[in-house]
Each structure stands twice: as C-alpha cells, then as structure tokens.
Amino acid sequence: MRDAATGDEPGNHPGNEPSRASTTDDRHETPTERMDRNWSELLQELRVTQTGSQVLTGFLLTVPFQQRFTELEPLEVDVYLLLVLLSVLSTGLLVAPVSLHRFMFRRHLKAETVTLGHRLARTGLAVLGLTIVGTVYFLFDVVVGRAAGAAAGGCVLAVLAVLWVVVPWLAARQAPVRRDDES
C-alpha cells in the first residue's frame, strides 16, 4: 500500500535504496529524488491555496469597518468571528509547511517533511473549505436572510465536497496502482 503523502511503498525512504528504481510510469528516480519532486509539487499546490486563503482572510478582516456591521444580530457576529478564526487557521495551516521546511532544512528529513507538509496542507484545505462555506452562509444570511444563507451554504458545501473529495477520490480509485519494481 502506498503512503498517501509521499506516493511511496512503506519502507521506501531516502537512503534505503542506493540504486535508481524503475517504476511503471517510466520514472527513474531514487527515493530522495522522489521526495524532492513530491515537495516541489506540494509547494506548487500551496502557492495556489495560500493566495485564496489570504485574500479571503483579508476580506473578512475588513468587514467590521463597514457601516452595516453594527446592525448585525448577535448570531451573525458570532458566525463572523468564527469565520475569522477559521480563515486565520486555514492560512496558518497552508503556510505551515514553509516554516516546517525551515526547521527541517539540512537535517536529512525530507520524507518526514513531505509527509507532515502533506498533512498540514490537507487539513488547511478542509478548514479553508469550511471557511468558504461559512462565508457564503454569512453573506447570504446578512443580505437575504437566514434560510437563504443555510441553502447557499449547503449548496457550496455539496459542490466543494464533490470537487475536493468525491472527484479526486474517484479518480484515484480508478487509476491503476503503480508500484516500484522490486528488482
């Protein structure tokens, strides 16, 4: 079974295989090269999500300075404050792999860095998804009403669940399993 974070078989870590492994997808890379590639791919993904998370956080931080903010009901203020916390948490989780890399740099812990960075990124995506759903709920609640907020938030939750969980899961499930040759 492959490690979800690294794409490796259990036990394949830098230093375990001195020779280049031949894989079924025609890659000829050592475990260390694979970790370097996985880290680069993770960073590319984080560049996209960090920007969105930071823009959303910035938007939420400006809301209290709008004239209508004082007209919010107590529940709306609570939802807003929860959204700020979720947004800041998602930004923190999506930036955390960079800090992790700084602490792990030159310690020969690339596999551990990739694995933990992967987990932080997945958690950050989940929290970002909740923030997006909550923000849509909040905006519709304030502009149209609570029922519209619940409906819009529910629709966004369903769409994100399909796009971010179901489609990738189905694609991964249908893809052929590629294993390193044990030669």
Image (spheres, rainbow, N blue to C red):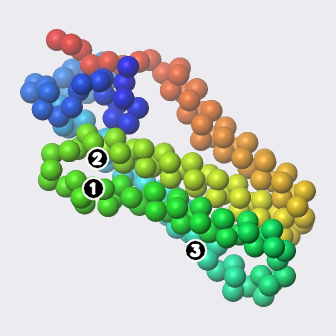
Which secondary structure lies at badge 3?
helix
Mark 3 crowdedness (10 Å alpha carbons): few <14, some 14-19, many ≥20: some
Tell me the quarter of the picture where residue 170 sits. top right
Mark 2 and mark 1 lie on one chain; the one further toward the N terminus is 1
Which secondary structure lies at badge 2?
helix
Tag 2 near tag 1, CB within 8 Å: yes
> Rounded to the nearest whole Å, what is the CA distance between mark 2 and mark 1?
6 Å
The three-letter amino acid code for the residue at tag 2 is Thr
Which circle marks residue 101 in the picture? 1
* x and y percentages locating residue 126 in the rendered image: 57, 48
> Rounded to the nearest whole Å, what is the CA distance between mark 2 and mark 3?
29 Å
Which circle marks residue 113 in the picture? 2
Residue at the spot of label 3: 58
The three-letter amino acid code for the residue at tag 3 is Gly
Which circle marks residue 83 in the picture? none
Q: Quadrant of the C terminus?
A: top left
Mark 3 and mark 1 lie on one chain; the one further toward the N terminus is 3
The three-letter amino acid code for the residue at tag 1 is His
- Residue 117 in sight in this render: yes
Taking the image as shown, residue 117 lies to the left or right of residue 82, namely left
Mark 2 crowdedness (10 Å alpha carbons): few <14, some 14-19, many ≥20: many
Which secondary structure lies at badge 1?
helix
Q: Quadrant of the N terminus?
A: top left
Taking the image as shown, residue 147 lies to the left or right of residue 179, namely right
* x and y percentages locating residue 122 in the rendered image: 48, 45
> Rounded to the nearest whole Å, what is the CA distance between mark 3 and mark 1?
25 Å
Q: Which residue is at 82% across, 63% downward?
A: 140
Decide which of 47, 3 is in the foreground and name it.
3
